[in-house]
Image: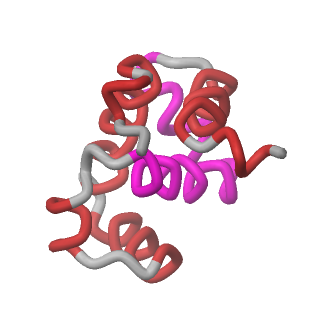
Amino acid sequence: MRDAKTNPDAAQIALRALVWILAEPDRAQRLLDTTGLDPQDLRARAGEPAMLSAVLGFLENYEPDLLACASDIGEPPQAIVAARAALDPEYYE
């Protein structure tokens, strides 16, 4: 089984994106609603590639958030998409 230690750069981007998402209550609620996660899941699974991939997928599915997050965390949007691919390569096959 892979974990976030397998790709620390991708995991770091995903964790920074998660913090960005959670900083705004409405956006955080949308994450929970669209992923089916709950706050306990987020805490318990924060280092798991599948959960981190879901967080990045949430951003990929709404371009305004993807672009705003990328700008705020100092990464190009392509880096967020690449991080998701690194965390969950099977998603892109």
Q: Does the magenta portion include 78?
A: no
Residue at image x 59%, y 39%?
84
Instruction: Out of 78 and 3, give the one closest to the viewer.
Output: 3
Residue 44 place in picture, x, y as percent: 16, 61
| Residue 4 image-quadrant placement | top left
Q: Residue furthest right?
A: 93
Q: Does the magenta portion include 72?
A: yes
How many numbered marks does the figure carry? 0
| Residue 20 image-quadrant placement | top left
Is residue 27 positioned above or below 89 on the image?
below
9 on left or right of 71: left
How is the structure coloured here? secondary structure
Residue 79 place in picture, x, y as percent: 60, 22
Residue at image x 29%, y 58%?
24
Q: Residue furthest front?
A: 1
Instruction: Out of 71 and 57, give the one closest to the viewer.
Output: 57
Residue at image x 34%, y 66%?
28
| Residue 22 image-quadrant placement | bottom left
* Span shown in magenta: 49-74
19 on left or right of 9: left
Quadrant assignment for the N terminus: top left
Is residue 47 positioned above or below 11 on the image?
below
